[in-house]
Amino acid sequence: MNNAKMWLVVKPTVGVPLFLTAVAVGSFAVHVAVLSKTNWYNNYLVGAPLNATAALQVEDGSQNAAYIPGGTQQVLVTMPDGTTARAILVMPDAATLN
């Protein structure tokens, strides 16, 4: 123990509970900061999508795309700021999946 002499100044019956209380208060403060400074946590608690504007949509309009080994799929990505981009997803061959 590299801080063994500390217990000559502070009794363990005082120091250990004080240390554990400080850890608990710090943890509580971090959780309060996350809950009060973010806007996604309430949506997460009720099961809503975290960011509906950044959802991927398949070009033909369907939300469920079939997986075709070795094939490609083009998707439209809508960013949170409203800009869009096209992305091409290349599916791996069936042999590489095993």
Image (tube, helix red, strand yellow):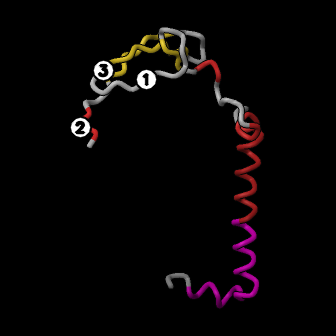
**Helix or strand or loop: what does disc 3 sit on?**
loop
**Helix or strand or loop: what does disc 1 sit on?**
loop
Residue named by callout 2:
96
Pointer 1 or 2: first along the chain: 1
Cα–Cα gap, marks 1 and 3: 10 Å
Q: Quadrant of residue 39?
A: top right
The amino acid pointed to by label 2 is Thr
Query: Left or right: 10 with respect to 87?
Result: right
Q: Is residue 37 above or below residue 26?
A: above
Kindly tell me whether residue 43 is visible in this rendering.
yes
CB contact under 8 Å: marks 1 and 3:
no
Question: Residue at left 65%, top 30%?
Answer: 50
The amino acid pointed to by label 1 is Ala
Give, as a single range, the part of the protein colored magenta.
4-23
Pointer 3 or 2: first along the chain: 3
Residue named by callout 3:
71
Asked whether 90 or 98 is in front, the reply is 98
Query: Left or right: 62 with respect to 94?
Result: right
Q: Identify the main secondary structure in magenta.
A: helix
Give the image location of residue 18, x and y in percent: 74, 75
Residue 66, numbered circle: 1
**Helix or strand or loop: what does disc 2 sit on?**
helix
